[in-house]
Image (spheres, coloured by chain):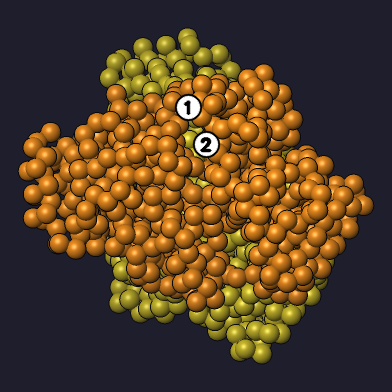
Chain colours: A yellow, B orange
Amino acid sequence: MSDPADFLSRLSGALPAAALRAVAPRYLSEPRGRWEGRACAVVAPGSAEEAATALRLACEARVPVIPYGGGTGLVGGQVAQGGAAPLLVSLERMTRIREVYPDENVMIVEAGAILSDVHDAAEKAHRLFPLSIAAKGSARIGGLLATNAGGVNVLRYGNARDLCLGLEAVMPSGEVWHGLKRLRKDNTGYDLRNLLIGSEGTLGLITAASLKLAPRPAGEGTALMVVEGPAAALRLLSMARDHMGEGVSAFELMHREGLNFLAETMPQVRQPWEAAPEWFVLIDVGLARGLDPAGALEALFEAALEAGLVSDGMIAQSEGQRTDFWTIRESIPEANRHIGAISSHDVSLPLGAVAEFVAAAPGALARIGAFRINCFGHLGDGNLHYNVFPVPGRSRVEHEDQRDAIKTCVHDMVHALGGSVSAEHGIGRLKVGDLERYGDPAKLAAMRAIKAALDPAGIMNPGAVLRVL
Amino acid sequence: MSDPADFLSRLSGALPAAALRAVAPRYLSEPRGRWEGRACAVVAPGSAEEAATALRLACEARVPVIPYGGGTGLVGGQVAQGGAAPLLVSLERMTRIREVYPDENVMIVEAGAILSDVHDAAEKAHRLFPLSIAAKGSARIGGLLATNAGGVNVLRYGNARDLCLGLEAVMPSGEVWHGLKRLRKDNTGYDLRNLLIGSEGTLGLITAASLKLAPRPAGEGTALMVVEGPAAALRLLSMARDHMGEGVSAFELMHREGLNFLAETMPQVRQPWEAAPEWFVLIDVGLARGLDPAGALEALFEAALEAGLVSDGMIAQSEGQRTDFWTIRESIPEANRHIGAISSHDVSLPLGAVAEFVAAAPGALARIGAFRINCFGHLGDGNLHYNVFPVPGRSRVEHEDQRDAIKTCVHDMVHALGGSVSAEHGIGRLKVGDLERYGDPAKLAAMRAIKAALDPAGIMNPGAVLRVL
């Protein structure tokens, strides 16, 4: 590596003043406060070409580069640990909605666009951009794609990768790939788009994307229904799809513990029941013309009651009530943060194995110690957030020495059932060891070969996804 | 390269007798009869492990390997040209449906399973495997995935890649990747699955796949509607989706020339009109419970008539009539073969550019000569099969010298409009030059780096997708 001061002076000589940023603390923190990052400099390019300049200079100087979106990632992919202090390339100045094609259901946006701004732009064109996560007010499109974000609408509309038709990206060589296609079918060569999506900034820097929009459903409805457990919930989902086909847009499982946490830490959130049930689901539907969502949910509820799948339920009668129901679901991650998890797990399972996992995990964890468990998530995708907390009166720091055992216990069970130890958050730096432990050796070898081929200098987000050898 | 006889004797020593096949002519031909292939041997492994043995021996002896499915590809990906005679690895013995999980909407099948057998197995489980192409009676799952096949239901259900949750594959090194996940969300590392899908056998050999099933729609309906041209057809599609949401499963554009070709070469196919209209669409819908498909198509037709988008139409009143309508669409490729195209083009365009292309292309081609054009395809995906034929009384051989000019004329226009010169058929050997001419240089460089990294000996389907340098 060349002299750092030299690199910084070449960087500031090659980029406009507007692209140079101070290394502010906000770039170095992450949402759960577990790690503090480092950076030798921060640049905010205004175009793919400026980003390419930054990457070329970094490559020449062998300075690591971390692509930086909204900083909302939960696995440390945006936070350097060890090695030379990296250059952070922040997308914060590339926030334009470049084009909207409502008739094509396509929108071209720069990678720094914030998710909620993309939602608004789609709505203005009477369309829907369906990707939605709790951090939508700060997460940026580039980061959402780099991590293949999931969220609450995957059941109907897919992950981030399913919503992307094309990319503009700077490859580690500094070449710009102009791949902003608006095509539904394009079989011209290897799927570089999907390779970059989910590679967490280790294979290139996404600067813009061509996104799929969806028609807005004619009518939407939301219900809460009480179920006996995950197995009944999955049968209810099957019944809901039998009734409404693709109309089921979200199917979220929640547990009483989530309501307890809300009552404890966020009393302003309206509780749906006086006596909280053990398990319940939030069902969201968006239906085509000629169908009444509240009526369809009512019919579903009655059929499910008849079949013994639900014991209680409420169907939103107004937009205000829909918001109330969703507020419960969307406040749970914040309540979790207030309580303070010892260990959080973002896992997925084959749908047929969800109930077995949920039944067996508490017993296995009880052999390690006494904990509270808040299990919730996107049941329709088999994606559970399985978070382990101290019992009342104790704090997470008292359990530091148990964290590894808890994590291994949960992940081993998930893996044995054919599941994934990172359903939607990615690998980042937090789960590099998990990937080595549970990943398929042939796939890992292929990943390492691809990384070495596309980024021979190893400058792109080193230490994320793959260990630096 | 070592002695070929030596390689063949090691191969027959290492594999069971059942895996050894004679080099029959059927392995060396392709549907349009344009090229004849070559092979030093054909093996049909019974498992991923046997396939891995074959690849390891081929790699040691530097013998090229061509993965062989149903042999239905249209771009010569399965037909060796030049270089050493390859080993064909046929999937014909790996045809098992390994597992069906109806509650998960998942099925695990071996790569040699024939598409129509997969359809039948899904139906037996009251589910739908939606991928459908004309060659469904002979195309095999491995080939469909290796080429990311499209077909008539992409509009609703996506391409082959959208219907695959996981793969088992032999990497060029001979290592087996065990990636048959049944998960809807799995963000553990690079997307090797999508990299192999669409790589046309140049990066590995798919031996089994975990496939997504869909619920069967409660009711299905089909209509033919006469439109003024592609622009009106696209507005009709928009209206259809506004009425029926995701319920629109196919939206196929056809031209009078297709009906002429049918009348000329396949008089047994029932013609829908006495006087054929210039442009018409086939609309297929599958709706959830509580909706009547024929009634919904009737309502759509009336609204479209009101809006001036359609001038005539017929809605199938029975399953027999649905079959009749579909037979027209599905017989057009065969009628085309009877007439004999000078040049066929599988192109896609941004939806907003389809009408412009269809309006401009005939004039541009007329500057080359006098031709008949049959333009048809999956309009909802922007995917047109734009095929150019001799006028009556002349034959394709008389136009040999114009083929390149015709192809370049069509492809240049498509490329200038932001389209793709291979929408669903892939690159194979036929379009290697097109990929070099129209492909993005940064993407091509990345593809070459990936190929060299995963297949350093260059044994996997050399000459397909990328030129052997």
Chain bearing tag 1 is B
Q: Which residue is drawn at 34% across and 28% down?
A: B467
Q: Residue at x 65, y 78 (%)?
A: A225
Amino acid type for the residue under numbered disc 2: Ser
What residue is disc 2 on? B422
Q: Is residue B33 left or right of residue A252?
A: left
Q: Is B349 above or below relative to B301? A: above
Q: Residue at x 60, y 68 (%)?
A: A251
What residue is disc 1 on? B434
- Give percent across and percent down for residue B109: 38, 65
Q: Residue furthest right?
A: B306
Q: How far apart are marks 1 and 2 (CA)?
A: 9 Å
- Give percent across and percent down for residue A232: 54, 81
Task: Tell me if label 1 and label 2 are in contact, CB under 8 Å.
Answer: yes
Q: Is A231 above or below relative to A321? A: below
> Do the residues indicated by labels 1 and 2 lie within the same chain of the protein?
yes
